[in-house]
Amino acid sequence: MLARVWRAGDQPMITRRAKLLSSLFLVQVLLGAATWVTNFGWPAWFTESIWAVEYTVVAQGRLQVHLTTAHAAVASLTLAAALNLLLWSHRLLHR
């Protein structure tokens, strides 16, 4: 659905908002993965078969706190961007 809105070349306001939403979503997924790694460590299948990574999970470490906070903040921005895209597309495309 987002890709279809992204190609709406005749409505630049909607296209910009769709690009912002897709960028925020990508950042959100990457931050989620980084948050998971800092909270729980690398998965066993990853370290055994793909890449041996030496990482020790530090409880309440500075990196863990910053990544978790950034993940929550980007989630809020993603929700706001999705609502903004919905309202603008409803306003401009349903006239």
Image (cartoon, rainbow, N blue to C red):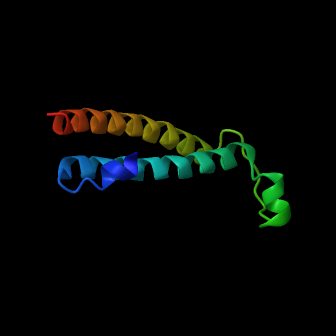
**Residue at x 78%, y 61% (from the top left corner):** 54
Q: Position of residue 58 (x, y in %)?
A: 72, 45
Q: For the N terminus, give its image quadrant.
A: top left
Q: Position of residue 45 (x, y in %)?
A: 82, 56
5 vs 91: above or below: below
**Residue at x 30%, y 56% (from the top left corner):** 7
What is the residue that sits farthest to the front in this orientation? 95
What is the residue that sits farthest to the left in this orientation? 95
What is the residue that sits farthest to the right in this orientation? 48
Q: Position of residue 21 (x, y in %)?
A: 37, 46
Q: Is residue 2 left or right of residue 57?
A: left
27 vs 75: above or below: below
Q: In this view, does 10 lie to the left or right of 36?
A: left
Q: For the C terminus, give its image quadrant.
A: top left
**Residue at x 18%, y 50% (from the top left corner):** 11
Q: Where is residue 77 in the image (x, y as percent from the top left)?
A: 38, 38
Q: In this view, does 20 lie to the left or right of 37?
A: left
In the depicted view, which residue is nearer to us: 6 or 72? 6
**Residue at x 78%, y 59% (from the top left corner):** 46
Q: Is residue 44 left or right of residue 76?
A: right
Report the number of discs.
Answer: 0
In the depicted view, which residue is nearer to us: 64 or 94? 94
In the depicted view, which residue is nearer to us: 37 or 48? 48
